[in-house]
Amino acid sequence: MNMTNPMREIVLDKVVVNIGIGSNDQLFQNSKMLISKLTGRNAVATKARKRDPSLNIKRGQVIGAMVTLRKGAASDMLKRALDANNNTLKERSIIDNSLSFGIKEYIDFAGVKYDPKIGMMGMNINANFSRKGKRVEMRRRMRGKEDHEHRRVSREEITQFMEKNFGVKISNE
């Protein structure tokens, strides 16, 4: 008899697609167009938190575009992004509660062709994981505390989840 706690089940919370472009307005428009082409959602601008004179960036200046996907859209995008990454992840890209990896060129996605208006761009993919019951701590009414061990999703658990649900191979490089 298998006695497992259903509240310990890991779920994909969200996937964030991010393209950093620096201080170029034309690249910002191209990155927004690319993100909407890949995800079907409108991208939002990310702004600089600090100024960096060496990169010619001022505080509050638009330096990238991003979109956050949840539920089914997050799962679909993660599958497509992993497929573009040959279904492999480096072990160091997985930390507690999340994994991050990059895609060098958007043409690695299946069914996406090169668009000369956009040019060549890469992106970062970040996936966050949680357990069932997270809402107890996040809700506004009758809020409760979530135990630290329940909140933490370890690297090993994420590795098992990714291998089981997405068929990903984890390499040691």
Image (cartoon, rainbow, N blue to C red):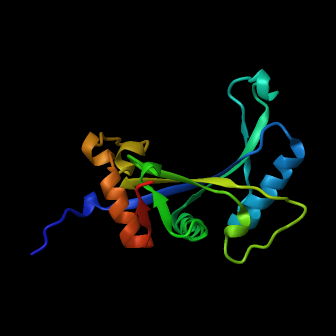
In the picture, residue 140 is in which quadrant?
A: top left
127 versus 55 height, above or below: below
Q: Which of 10 and 162 is in front in this view?
A: 162
Q: Residue furthest left?
A: 1
Q: Residue at left 78%, top 53%?
A: 31
Residue 77 spot, x, y in % from top left:
59, 66
Q: Residue 53's spot in the image, x, y percent? A: 78, 21
Residue sitting nearer the eye, 107 or 72: 107
Q: How many labels does the image show?
A: 0
Quadrant containing the C terminus is bottom left
Q: In this view, does 102 lie above or below 111?
A: above
Residue ID at (55%, 54%): 101
Residue 105: percent from the left, percent from the top? 71, 61
Horizontal arrangement in the rendering, residue 128 relative to residue 21 (left or right): left
Q: Is residue 25 above or below residue 171?
A: above
Horizontal side of residue 97 vs 102, given as left or right: left
Image location (x, y in percent) of residue 123: 67, 54
Q: In which quarter of the image is the N terminus?
A: bottom left
Q: Which residue is drawn at 28% across and 40% down?
A: 148
Q: Is residue 147 visible?
A: no
Residue 46 visible within the image? yes
Name the residue at the bottom extreme. Answer: 111
Farthest residue, direction front: 173
